[in-house]
Image (tube, rainbow, N blue to C red):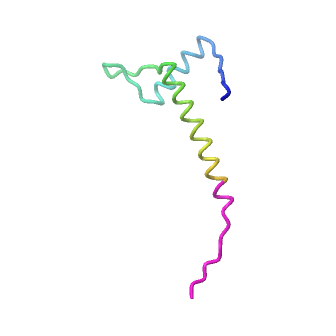
């Protein structure tokens, strides 16, 4: 499988960490919000991409369905 790399600056890293921490509802031991780790961000991105692919594939499968007449007697 191909590898996708996303390059970010230190400032962007901080913003990503904060944003994903909020998105995931992460807190430290005292209950205060915390930033997401690189591993947590990577997993969330993988989950998002997987969801997009599955959603599009389901939509395409639904569009390919043809109605067959059903006429019981």
66 relative position to 73: left or right: right
| In this picture, residue 30 sits left or right of residue 16 | left
Which part of the image, by quadrant, shows the C terminus? bottom right
Q: Nearer the viewer, residue 71 or 30?
A: 71
Q: Nearer the viewer, residue 59 or 23?
A: 59
> Residue 70 lies in magenta, yes or no?
yes
Residue drawn at (62%, 42%) of the image: 53
Question: Closer to the camera, 9 or 60?
Answer: 60
Where in the figure is residue 43, as x and y percent of width and height?
51, 28
Residue displayed at 54% across by 25% down: 42
Which residue appears at 55% of the width and 19% of the height? 15
Relative to 29, residue 46 above or below? below
Q: Quadrant of residue 67?
A: bottom right
Q: Principal SS element in the magenta part?
A: loop
Q: Which residues are magenta?
A: 61-73
The residue under the point 60% across, 16% down is 12
Horizontal arrangement in the rendering, residue 43 relative to residue 12 (left or right)? left
């Amino acid at each position: 499988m191909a590898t996708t790399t996303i390059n970010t600056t230190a400032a962007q890293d901080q913003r990503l960490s904060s944003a994903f921490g909020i998105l995931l509802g992460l807190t430290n031991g005292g209950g205060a919000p915390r930033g997401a780790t690189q591993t947590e961000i990577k997993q969330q991105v993988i989950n998002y991409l997987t969801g997009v692919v599955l959603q599009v594939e389901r939509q395409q499968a639904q569009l390919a369905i043809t109605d067959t007449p059903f006429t019981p007697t």
